[in-house]
Image (cartoon, coloured by chain):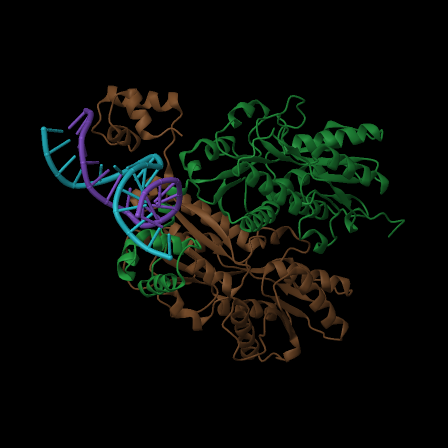
Chain colours: A green, B brown, C cyan, D purple
Amino acid sequence: MVTIRDIAKAAGVSPMTVSNVLNSHPQVRATTRARVLQTIDELGYRVNVAARNLRRGRTHTIGFAVPELDRPYFGDLATRVVAEAERHGLQVVIEETSASRDNELGALSHSRVRMYDGLILSAVGLGSRDADLLSVDFPMVILGERIFDGPVDHVAMPNIEGAAAAVRHLHEQGCRRVAGVFAGAVADADADVSMSSLRHEGYRRALAELSLPLDASLSISIPKLDLAVALEAVGNSLASGLRFDGIFCSTDYVAIAVIRALSDAGLRVPDDVKVIGFDNSMLSRYLIPSLSTVDTDTALVARTAVELLVARIDGDAAEPVQFVPPFRIVARESTRSAALG
Amino acid sequence: MVTIRDIAKAAGVSPMTVSNVLNSHPQVRATTRARVLQTIDELGYRVNVAARNLRRGRTHTIGFAVPELDRPYFGDLATRVVAEAERHGLQVVIEETSASRDNELGALSHSRVRMYDGLILSAVGLGSRDADLLSVDFPMVILGERIFDGPVDHVAMPNIEGAAAAVRHLHEQGCRRVAGVFAGAVADADADVSMSSLRHEGYRRALAELSLPLDASLSISIPKLDLAVALEAVGNSLASGLRFDGIFCSTDYVAIAVIRALSDAGLRVPDDVKVIGFDNSMLSRYLIPSLSTVDTDTALVARTAVELLVARIDGDAAEPVQFVPPFRIVARESTRSAALG
DNA sequence: CTGAAAGCGCTTACAG
DNA sequence: CTGAAAGCGCTTACAG
């Protein structure tokens, strides 16, 4: 391997001058610089980043711990995080946590964390009771669903408000019996404060406001926000006689399976049942019917998370920040009422 | 920051004994080990990975340069690469290249490459003429579409064969006038050997074999495999009078927009036009109609790429390997013929 | 404008 | 079973 010393010897200068050239320090004579650069080119030298990192104490790498990269929402998010990080000269290591608490803690406490300048943790397995575990000694931003009064910056989602607005939209479009699909044990009032339980809370609040029925059976609970699981759960509910004229889906992704289940049961969307999702994933407007949804500005979420993290990396010691992006309802075919059709 | 020396001092041993404990070397007395571990715990020590990397000459990190992470196929692929890499104790840094040749070369030549033990490059911008640029001095696996006789391992895709099989499937289902959607200047015989041009080649070969018409107008060319672009292109083609009873789409992703464009033009899938995609993305079976497609075993692609790379990292100096996964046609509703319906 | 020297935190033959 | 010492390749005050 060619090192800085080899270049120095070949160019007839000291290693430090080579270093100065590499780091574009101005106090190097033009002719010296040219000679060094040519030698670098000839010998095919490339800086050893591990050595530079050790010396500088920075890796210019951040971690992004994400539940499941193959869910479109997180694919979008990862894309935007990588792009934003690049604008700040940072690389991104993706760690998949499979939405498990253990893996999320692993992303935190695992020794390799020390290779990152900071961590963006999209927490879905951790709960409020884990707040004290988040007092880490490196820059971190929590991203996602849970409500913490934790010791770190947090980019949260408008879960309750967004879900409530989605239900109100269904009501405006004429729905009078509104179901919902949620992950986890949402029926349990003591349930952990997960994304789905927050969206379920918004769903229930809106139903109460609107004086719509709130049968427990209308809350379809699935163990995981997975297409196959959602298809089966909604199919079973319909087969066992459950009826509704509107349904709120915790994610656009799940909504695709829900629409399929409705179709398989002979129900038409939106004529028989109106469907709304959450996330405004890129596909949603191309589906048939196009999918109404809650847009939460993924780009803004990614940008804010990276900017908060960069500020902490640069030594910002202010109080932890909590940021919730705005949202808007995107009305498409899946909730269109016949009167407007 | 707590270092190994702090631990050594506090535990009354030498730094090297601490190192031995950290690395689970057996030749440390149990009582000494216990004392060191306790001190590590008390002082909150974590290994400095940059220093360890420098010393060991390994970072246990590989790069994965991918065109666009928000395209479902690459989201799937990234998920599987990350999972496979983890099985080998490797982390993955994702670099997005935006499918540009410059960024792909950047992933290669950029100095930061030196931080990786190896690189998996999903090349879509590079062409055969760039083969000599791939003679790099670190382990690399090219993944994806192009045909190289390059100096590196290559996991290719059955682009020509898969596309041809898709067209034959359309023919078997009764199609007699088959269009296709491709990215780039596919009409040009000198076109670069891109994924789309290879799939176009397969499309043309199958049409020729089957004695089906091969009008240039049936090859719908779009600048980019993007939903909005595909929607508009197919919409324009239909508006200008183009008619066909089957269409091969270069990816499942694009097929979603194509089905939407057909629907917007009042054409029913599969009754009026049958549609087949490529990739077997996870969504495909849940769409309405469910999407017929070419499955190329993404899991196998990811596993093979990581295994080849790991072998190179471990010093394997054998001749470059080329691997093409098998494929199969997955027939779903979007190509169902009335007779079978 | 250039260089000698120290040191980032760790690991590894080598010696005892 | 444990330690003293060298060194991975780089950067950075400091001196000239």
- In the rendering, at what x and y percent does residue A311 appear? 57, 39
Picture residue at 34% right of the left edge, 57% below the top = B138
Place residue A217 in its image quadrant. Answer: top right
Picture residue at 35% right of the left edge, 55% below the top = A18
- Is residue B134 found left or right of B335 in the rendered image? left
Place residue B329 in its image quadrant. Answer: bottom right
- Is residue B68 found left or right of B5 in the rendered image? right
Instruction: Please indicate, yes or no, whether residue A161 appears anywhere in the rendered image.
Output: yes
Quadrant of the frame with the N terminus of chain A: bottom left
Residue in the foreground of this view, choosing between A155 and A205: A155
Residue extending furthest right?
A339
- In the rendering, at what x and y percent does residue A307 appear? 59, 42
- In the rendering, at what x and y percent does residue B242 appear? 72, 75
Q: Is residue D14 above or below residue A47?
A: above
Instruction: Please indicate, yes or no, whether residue A242 appears anywhere in the rendered image.
Output: no
- In the rendering, at what x and y percent does residue B133 appear? 40, 67
Place residue A4 in its image quadrant. Answer: bottom left
- Is residue A26 found left or right of A332 in the rendered image? left
Residue in the foreground of this view, choosing between A40 and A198: A40
Residue in the foreground of this view, choosing between A21 and A161: A21
Q: Is residue A40 above or below residue C6?
A: below
Q: Is residue B121 above or below residue A92?
A: below
Picture residue at 70% right of the left edge, 35% below the top = A159
- Is residue B113 found left or right of A220 in the rendered image? left
Residue in the foreground of this view, choosing between A167 and A177: A167
